Amino acid sequence: MAYSVLQGLCSPACGTFTCLLPFRQLIRSLLLASLVAELAAAAVLGRVETSVRTAQGLDADLRTLCDAIGPRMAGTEAMRDALQWGLRSFQEAGLQTARLEPVPIPRAWREGETRIEVVQPRPFRLRAAASAFSPSVREPKEAELALGGSGQEGAILQAGESLRGKIVLVELREASSLESLGLSQRDAMVAVREAAEVGALAVLIVSTRPRQLLYRHVNNLSAELDPIPSALVAREDGLRLARLLELDERVRVRLDMPNQIGSSFETANVVAEIPGDGLPDEIVLLGAHLDSWDMGTGCLDNAVNVALVLHVARAIAEAGVRPLRTLRFVLFGGEEFGLFGSLAYVDSHRAELDRHVATLVHDMGGGPLSGYSTGGRRDLLRQVERLLGGADEFGRLRHTAKAYFMSDNFTFMLQGVPSLFAVQETSDYYSSYHSEADTFDKVDIDSVRSSAVVAARTLVGIAQETERIAERWSAAEVSRWLQDQGLIRHLRFLGVWDAWRPQRNGAALDSN
């Protein structure tokens, strides 16, 4: 083939060397065009980076979300205010396509005036908070307290009939990392399910954080009510109870947990765009969840990354950049209840998912960004390393193919859409995760701005690529990935495999 092309470029009378001249000129022109394109792309990224570093509003956005609006649990007035604020903020940044898209939530839940107290051997009140989606205890109930281990699988089942009608105390280990916190959350889920199976009245879970710190987690991701009531008790109180029981003291506890439980309702996602200039039908998405739990002010989880998304959108708009593909920015609603915001997004945008080139999701606090996870995709990892290699001036980024089941990124991965999840330093994050301590004073604004620079370079860099950085996986490929990563058992444990399993054209794939 090369000889035929060369022959076509030569005149019949040309000599051996002179006939190569047009070919060399063509190669030179192609190389020059490539160099010009690279320089133009670098100039665009430079403009974006400068704008992200200098644009105003990041600190003000965080103060508004964390302090003025505060905790933003789905279905609350504060969340409705946050949605309107997000919509208005995108519009004021120049993204006139900004809109609210509905997100259905199957059940409403709020904590009532929880009161848990010891009545024997000596009366005292416990510092406590109801677990999310715990059933209500509207008429105070009193029962004997019994030790239920530390959440290890099978421990409560082994105790069996001896726990029937009792309140079970589960002593979780103190958290020392985000990973250990996740394991403790799993242990709490196991304890509640096993306690219900043996006929226990309720479960008290000892907090994994010291100094009276309380927090809130779900025990399932489907917004179903737990089978029996459960509550978190302050670590100091819980350990006191455990010591009393270890001394064979008879401990009786009274529960009053009038949680407010309602029917299905609707929240929303905030969606905005900067249209592409060349391939506007193809989409690169940057997102973070807007909702939070009702403890603290939801600043590290996840106001810092909502502010990051808005800051990147504002900076790109101010720089006047229109990359090849459309940039879409999404603030998801209902993530804390069970990824309902991103589930609603992929459902309503199912017809255009083939045109989603990539998604980026930030939801791991405000610590220094250490890189992106590609969720097990090695092909995507190589592309990210190539795209960000020149941007890593300090050599700090360490991208990974590890699959994180952490946030709304997982919804896109189940649909086969190439997805990146921001991995961040969490030493200052896990201790206040979902807790009363998640407040503005924990935020390092400079760190958030630095992460925004990387997010913007990644977003625009992917949008500017001539070819897609990776292809969308088929449902069969996603199923193989789930098996390889050992995630099917995880999804079954969480009770969402039947609802979330990979599907195309309405047909779900089965898997053992």
Image: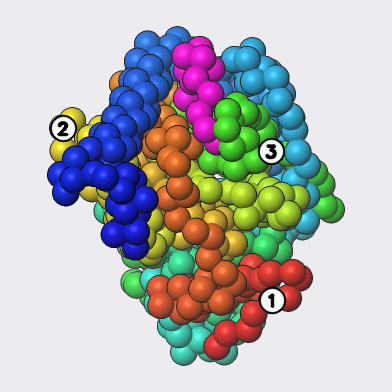
Q: Is residue 42 left or right of residue 464?
A: left
Instruction: Name the residue: 64% across, 68% down.
Output: 500
Residue drawn at (38%, 64%) of the image: 376
- Whether residue 361 is situated above or below residue 32 in the rendered picture: below
Spatial separation of the CA atoms under disc 1 and disc 2: 45 Å
Identify which residue, 69 or 229, lies in the foreground.
69
Q: Quadrant of residue 153?
A: bottom left
Residue underneath mark 3: 269
Please tell me whether mark 1 sits on a helix, a strand or a loop. Answer: strand
Q: Is residue 274 visible?
A: yes
Q: Count all numbered tags in the image, as a single digit.
A: 3
Q: Residues within 10 Å of mark 2 (few under 14, many from 20)?
A: few
Residue 508 — which label? Answer: 1
Residue contact at pointers 3 and 2, CB within 8 angstroms: no
Magenta run includes residue 319:
yes
Q: Position of residue 504 (x, y in %)?
A: 69, 69
Of callouts 3 and 2, the N-terminal one: 3
Q: Which is nearer the eye, 160 or 499?
A: 499
| Numbered range of the magenta stretch | 312-328
- Report how far apart the C-alphas of labels 1 and 3 lie in the structure: 26 Å
Residue 394's label in the rendered image is 2
Q: Secondary structure at mark 3?
A: strand
What crowding class fits label 3: few (fewer than 14 Cα within 10 Å), some (14-19), or many (20 or more)?
many
| Amino acid at pointer 2 | Phe
On the image, the x and y values in percent for residue 88 come to: 68, 18
- Tell me: 366 left or right of 285: left
Give left or right: position of 168 versus 382: right
Taking the spot 59% from the left edge, 37% from the top edge, the residue there is 279
In the image, is residue 393 part of the stretch drawn in magenta? no
